[in-house]
Image: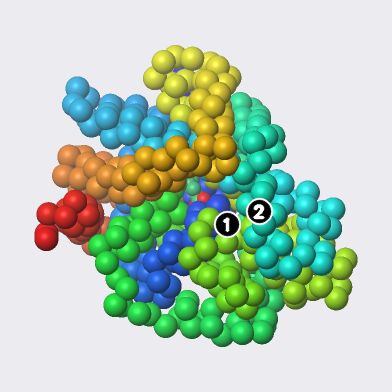
Amino acid sequence: MSNDRGNFGSKIGVILASAGSAVGLGNIWRFPTETGNNGGAAFILIYFACVLLLGFPILIAEFSIGRHSRSNTAGAYRKLSPGTRWKWVGRLGVAAGTFILCYYAVVAGWTLEYICQAATNSFAGTSPQGFIAAFSEFTANPWRPLVWLFAFMLTTHLVVVKGVEKGIERSAKVMMPALFILLIILAVCSVLLPDAEKGLLFLLKPDFSKVTGNVILSAMGQAFFSLSLGMGCLCTYASYFRAETNLSRTAINVAIIDTMVAILAGFIIFPAAFSVGIQPDAGPSLIFITLPNVFQQAFGGMPFLSTVLSVMFYILLALAALTSAISLLEVTTAYLSEEFSMSRKTAARMATAFCTFFGIICSLSLGIGKDITLFGMTVFDVFDYVTGKIMLPLGGMLISIFAGWILDKQILWKEVSNNGTLKVHTYKLVLFLLRFVVPVSIGLVFINELGLFK
Ligand code: PFF
């Protein structure tokens, strides 16, 4: 089966496709939400530390495991450690990816609604309160978000069924630079708004008194989510990398691109939120309420420019979400098709049907089902919490233990150095981080959360 698995074509294609998986709603929607909920600049500094000390080594580990095994994520652990329970790490990853896609597709669907609203000039003349009301009314509507959820899942499905190499790689080459340019334009507009400095202070002046165990757990979960780590997504992509791909360089590039996009998103959202008087902890709705405000306030006098920029922004947001959703669906599809000898089409159909079904439940839980709660959270929030704060960090910890302690060191070295042809100065440091720093840090944060330190 592995001979029709395909490969990415070019170096830049590998970087942009992997960055396409990493850059998505996690950067532009979830990062500002988590930063807002966790007190601002101090959270961002902890986030940087998590990317560097935990994210980077796990990226290398996932890349090495994927490329060496040339298999889906569960198959990879089975091949590398046959007859052991390590295949469960891969299965945990497949489950995490599938659950993430269930609620991810709901939010991605919202971006499609906002493309239409922006295109039909519905933002014109709306007050900040009007945007809040419009967003609540839309997400609570029993059917409109579902139409967009179906549309988004169908598009993701069609790309995955056809085989993603040419589609993902080509679109990533166009979309990623375009997304970057637009983010910069919008950040400049946002920073120039009246009272924007309050938002900048929130982003740049750390208040460490607000740091708790939960803040660190959130930063860690966000780093994993944003880098698509802890669940074998980039491990699956790496199984399509070429033998000559430089894994460390690809990992550094992906981490830098992903972090820069998240920070730029912060520079758009917070100055704009403070400028229009919205609390930074307004929750997941932040981007759907504050951004229309930015377009309105910054370009209200130039309706054509306002429309063009807002339509382009939501299109790019949808496409960023699409490249990430494709990578999520690819994990489940590759798993089903390779482990259960199904055709790619059947596997993708089953994965899409499952995610759409639970996506419907997540979507309805924000409207007619909002009173059904578990530990005080809606179904939507439960999916986000369980995947982001439990499954991904746990997966990250197990992956680091596997790569650091179980996997034959020769395999890791050969993958990182491309069979000894590359000089990799960071190899020893990465191994040290994987063996000690990653498992211990994640373990401590978990123990703290369970209250065992108190
Ligand atoms: N990294 C993506 C984002 O930031 O939106 C989301 C994601 C994609 C998470 C793929 C996990 C994953 F495996």
Q: Is mark 2 within 8 Å of ligand 1?
A: no
| Camera-nearest residue between 405 and 92 | 92
| Camera-nearest residue between 226 and 235 | 226
Image position of 274 with respect to 134: above or below: below
- Circle 2 packing at 10 Å, graded few (<14), some (14-19), many (20+), is some
Image position of 269 with respect to 442: above or below: below
At 29% across and 60% down in the image, what residue appears? 214
Q: Decide if residue 151 is on the left or right side of residue 165.
A: right
* Residue 418 appears anywhere in the view: no
User: Identity of the amino acid at label 1?
Assistant: Ser
Q: Decide if residue 338 is on the left or right side of residue 157.
A: left
Q: Position of residue 152 (x, y in %)?
A: 65, 37
At 32% across and 64% down in the image, what residue appears? 215
- Circle 1 packing at 10 Å, graded few (<14), some (14-19), many (20+), is some
Image position of 209 with respect to 367: above or below: below
* Image quarter of residue 8: top right
Question: Which secondary structure, mark 1?
Answer: loop
Q: How is the image coloured?
A: rainbow
Q: Are marks 2 and 1 in contact (CB under 8 Å)?
A: yes
User: Identity of the amino acid at label 2?
Assistant: Phe
Image position of 52 with respect to 4: above or below: below
Give the mark, 2 or 1, whose residue is nearer the N terminus: 2
The numbered mark at residue 214 is none
- Residue pointed to by mark 1: 285
| Camera-nearest residue between 99 and 155 | 99
Q: Position of residue 282 (x, y in %)?
A: 52, 63
- Residue pointed to by mark 2: 135
**Gap in angstroms between the C-alphas marked 2 and 1:** 7 Å
Question: Which secondary structure, mark 2?
Answer: helix
Image quarter of the C terminus? bottom left
